[in-house]
Amino acid sequence: MKKKAVVLLWCILILGSICPLAQAGSIRVYFSPNGGCTDAILSEINQAKTEILLQAYSFTSKPIAQALIRAHQRGVKISAVLDKSNRTQKYSAATFLKNLGIPVFIDDQHAIAHNKIMIIDNRVVITGSFNFSMAAENKNAENLLILDDLPDLTRAYQENFQKHLSHAVSYLGKEE
């Protein structure tokens, strides 16, 4: 496994013009607790111009939900695919987003839909272990990657988003 990681790192750092994963883009990394993950996500959402595709397991962050609402109000198209736990979770943003006109879908075809991804403007991919929650920012040991201008990688994440969206169901509201 170590050899594969070294080869991939070599590809990214040295052979950028040949390796499809390293296409003149940028990669930024953040860690929590208190490592600026939420602020980095907010910055990207605030710059969004056309579209945000969101996949989330736990989504309870009020600042992220508010930034998505502001983006929606600016005319950014947003779609959210969330884990089925958001149907019953006490503080889920699913109802909040749905009530403001953002399409929310529930991926209930897996034991856990554990993705934590945002794809912004067909250009930026945000991913990592970081759940979109205050606990992830302030209490948990998490990581976050922001991958910018890596078209092949972005396309792979978009295809995965569409795959999960295709079997997800519309969110109708919190179940008691």
Image (cartoon, rainbow, N blue to C red):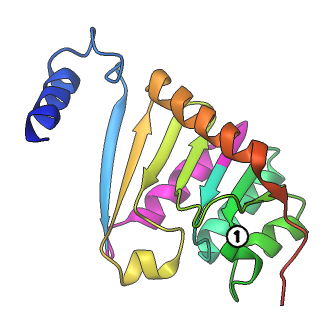
Give how far across and how far down residue 76 sits, in percent. 77, 44
45 up-or-down from 151: above or below: below
Residue extending furthest toward the top: 18
Percent coordinates x, y for residue 158 in the rendering: 61, 34
Q: Residue at x 62, y 54 (%)?
A: 55
**Residue drawn 83% across and 81% down?**
174
Q: Where the C terminus falls, by quadrant? A: bottom right
Which residue shows up at 91% across the image and 69% down it?
A: 172
Q: Which residues are magenta?
A: 33-53
Q: Is residue 13 magenta?
A: no
Q: Secondary structure at mark 1?
A: helix
**Residue 77 in view (yes/no):** no
Q: Residues within 10 Å of mark 1 (few under 14, many from 20)?
A: many
Residue 66, image x, y percentages = 69, 68
Q: In the rendered picture of this protein, how many numbered marks are placed on residues?
A: 1
Asked if residue 42 is among those painted magenta in the image, a careful observer would answer yes
**Residue depicted at x 82% and y 44%:** 75
Which kind of residue does numbered mark 1 sit on? Lys
In depth, the one of 14 and 48 nearer the eye is 14
With respect to residue 169, does 98 lie above or below?
Answer: below
Q: Is residue 1 left or right of residue 128?
A: left
Residue nearest the observer in this picture, 82 or 59: 82
| Image quadrant where residue 160 sits | top right
Q: Which residue is tagged 1?
A: 84
123 up-or-down from 105: above or below = above
Q: Quadrant of the N terminus?
A: top left
